[in-house]
Image (spheres, rainbow, N blue to C red):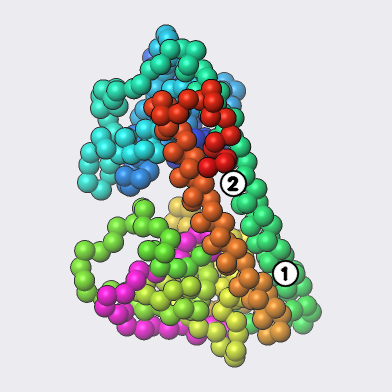
Amino acid sequence: MVRYLRAANVKDGTLDLTDVQSMNFTPAEQGIFALRPGDVLVSEGSGSLSSVGASAAWRGELDGMICFQNTLLRLRPRAGVEGRYLEWWARSAFGSGLFASIASGANIYHLGAERVRALPISLPPLEEQRRIADFLDIEVGKINTLTAKKRRLLSLLEEKIDSRVLEHIGTSQLVEDESGTPTLPIRRLLSKRNRPPRIDTEVVTAFRDGQVTARSLRRTDGYTLSATTEAQGQYVEPGDVVIHGLDGFAGAIGASEAAGNCSVVYHVCTPRNDGNSLFLGRLLRILATSGYLGLFAVSTRERAVDFRNWDLFGRIRIPDVPLRDQQEISGWISSARPFRVAVEESNALTDERRQALITAAVTGQIDVSTASGRGIEE
């Protein structure tokens, strides 16, 4: 049994090593698929053209032999090629759409080793390759640091909101008990709706980070939109509490920011007794991601919990938080939304500038010996 990397471990420019699996590799296979520090791994296939070809370099982050699965392509520099330059070239090929331009397939897009091998690569002298790699290491590092700081500020704000919700969860026994915050069944706090779908409207999705919004306002990658123009599913209004029946366990719960149709696998609810939808959506999400709601599931599937049965789900007891506290926490959630949007828009623009800088440096559009700092200033 040997640990190996697969497409899920490769992000644009980074390796996610939180879930590295193992399988059997014969000695001969180990000789073929073993990784060396400096190898560049490229995602060979994806359900989205914008995701196919994401790449990252293996730097020996884990001890022992590590292999790679055939869902990845391995680029290994030949003599006369700086490994870091090859890494930046692969990122340029991904971000500029070069990899996407050679992908084939319908629902799943594949690059193919032969097509990647045939791609032309601008190869300046070795010393110039090293200068380009040094320049991008520094300038892209600065950009990544700024992006991370903005995300951290947003994360701190979200943590503050969650801590206030957790105060009420912490004082509740979450069972029938006389002490602490009282509890009520979910169906006493939320009413399930079943509105007919509407024609020519948005598709609303509950994402695992707790945002519920129209796909057009966020992204459509990874989703297959229906080709029919007929209304399907059920209608969602802004402010509805939306709970994904299968992905709710992972955080796909929240108050909808948009109107549109969603799948029947969702529970679409409105608060009872003047309850606040922003607060209740956040409360349910925290109870789901903490594993509490999953304790009441009657059946499970791999890496999921089945919440689709409303009769059972609605009986789960949750804290009955005073309306005044609900309104206070709701105000914080509302104030965080514009900041989140601003961070997302800023980082999206930063991503575009970073990619433009990488491509310009790799293709020789800029002279890296005189371009220091342009990644930040522009």
Residue for point 25% across, 48% down = 107
Mark 2, residues whose alpha carbon is within 10 Å: few (<14), some, or many (≥20)? some
User: 123 or 263, which is in the foreground?
Assistant: 123
Q: Horizontally, is 336 left or right of 31 in the view?
A: right
- Specify few, some or many for label 1: CA neighbours under 10 Å numbering under 14, 14-19, or 20 or more: some
Q: Which residues are magenta?
A: 189-210
Q: Secondary structure at mark 1?
A: helix
- Residue shown at the point (57%, 30%) measured from the top left: 372
Q: Position of residue 364 (x, y in %)?
A: 41, 25
**Element marked by disc 2:** helix
Principal secondary structure, stretch drawn in magenta: loop
Q: Identify the residue under disc 2.
A: 147
Classify residue 65 as left or right of residue 199: right
Q: Which of the marked residues, 1 or 2, is nearer the chain's N terminus?
A: 2
* Residue in the image at 27% along x and 30% along y: 112
Coordinates of residue 330 in the picture (x, y in percent): 64, 76
Q: Nearer the viewer, residue 37 or 186?
A: 37
Q: Looking at the image, which is closer to me, 340 or 255?
A: 340
Q: Quadrant of residue 42?
A: top left
Outermost residue on the top side: it is 79
In the rendered view, tell whether residue 81 sits above or below residue 364: above
Q: Amino acid at mark 1?
A: Arg
Asked if the magenta segment contains residue 160, the reply would be no
Which x, y percent locates residue 350?
Answer: 52, 46
Q: Is residue 58 visible?
A: no
Query: Which labelled disc corresponds to residue 164?
Result: 1
